[in-house]
Image (cartoon, rainbow, N blue to C red):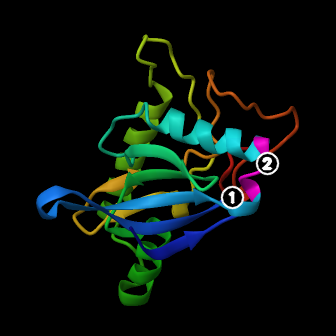
């Protein structure tokens, strides 16, 4: 059950959703849907399916978990962990408004936890033990979430590079946000 839209981007929309089950079972999660007009484009479908397939192989406390991948009425979706919190960009804005800046200890904690998630992704292996060769390529403040419980989670492996991806980036093609790319 989709509850409300959380965000929209060039490839998809993200919704807060509720999974329901027997005897009152309920769980909040996030559903990322490929935009309807892209659901007919094989390249975008392949990228979307790659994101889910690769992220589903990652199991680390600092990476948002993927629960399911599916298709309803021709629209592909990924069901994933709901992080009850905000992106680091929003946390930083609020800290600047209230205190002038985020405390150094908090900055260090977020960076440490996010890099622990990145390290886990970079060293991830397939179930058969093969290195995934995963590079996130979109580590930006919007893709680092801080939960109200103090957790830090890396999200959005949509433009990640991996050895076993079906889709591949063409030479000279740039993926990710320019302001956060390494030189």
In the drawing, does residue 157 fall left or right of residue 15?
A: right
Can you tell which quarter of the image residue 37 is in? bottom right
Where disc 2 sits, the SS reads: loop
Residue at 54% x, 52% y is: 77
Q: In this view, does 96 lie above or below 107?
A: below
For the N terminus, the image quarter is bottom left
Residue 39 covered by magenta stretch: yes
In the picture of the structure, the residue carrying the numbered disc 2 is 41
Q: Nearer the viewer, residue 167 or 1?
A: 1
Q: Which of 32 and 159 is in front in this view?
A: 32
User: What percent of the width, then of the height, locates residue 59?
Assistant: 34, 35
Q: Is residue 16 above or below residue 44?
A: below
- The magenta-colored residue range is 38-42
In the picture of the structure, the residue carrying the numbered disc 1 is 11
Where disc 1 sits, the SS reads: loop
Q: Sequence-wise, which precedes: disc 1 or disc 2? A: 1
Say if residue 136 shows up in the picture: no
User: What percent of the width, then of the height, locates residue 129?
Assistant: 43, 11
Q: Main secondary structure of the magenta part?
A: loop
Residue at 88% x, 37% y is: 172
* Mark 1 or 2: the one toward you: 2
Can you tell which quarter of the image residue 146 is in? bottom left
For the C terminus, the image quarter is top right
Residue 161 covered by magenta stretch: no
Can you tell which quarter of the image residue 149 is in? bottom left
Residue at 34% x, 55% y is: 152
Q: Is residue 161 above or below residue 65?
A: above
In the drawing, does residue 65 fall left or right of residue 48?
A: left
User: What percent of the width, then of the height, locates residue 65?
Assistant: 37, 45
Residue at 74% x, 55% y is: 38
Q: Is residue 124 above or below residue 105?
A: above
Residue that lies at the very extreme toward the right in this rendered image: 172
């Amino acid at each position: 059950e989709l509850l409300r839209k959380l965000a929209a981007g060039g490839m998809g929309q993200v919704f807060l959703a509720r999974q329901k089950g027997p005897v009152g079972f309920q769980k909040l999660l996030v559903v990322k849907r490929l935009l309807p007009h892209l659901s007919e484009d094989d390249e975008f479908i392949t990228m979307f399916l790659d994101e889910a397939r690769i992220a589903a192989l990652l199991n680390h406390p600092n990476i948002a978990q993927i629960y399911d991948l599916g298709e309803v009425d021709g629209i592909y979706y990924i069901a994933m962990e709901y992080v009850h919190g905000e992106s680091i960009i929003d946390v930083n804005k609020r800290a600047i408004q209230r205190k002038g800046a985020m405390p150094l200890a908090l900055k260090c904690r977020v960076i440490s936890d996010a890099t622990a998630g990145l390290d886990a992704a970079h060293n991830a292996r397939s179930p058969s033990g093969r290195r995934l060769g995963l590079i996130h390529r979109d580590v930006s403040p919007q893709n680092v979430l801080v939960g109200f419980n103090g957790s830090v989670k890396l999200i959005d492996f949509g433009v990640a590079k991996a050895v076993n991806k079906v889709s591949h980036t063409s030479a000279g093609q740039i993926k990710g946000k320019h302001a956060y790319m390494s030189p």
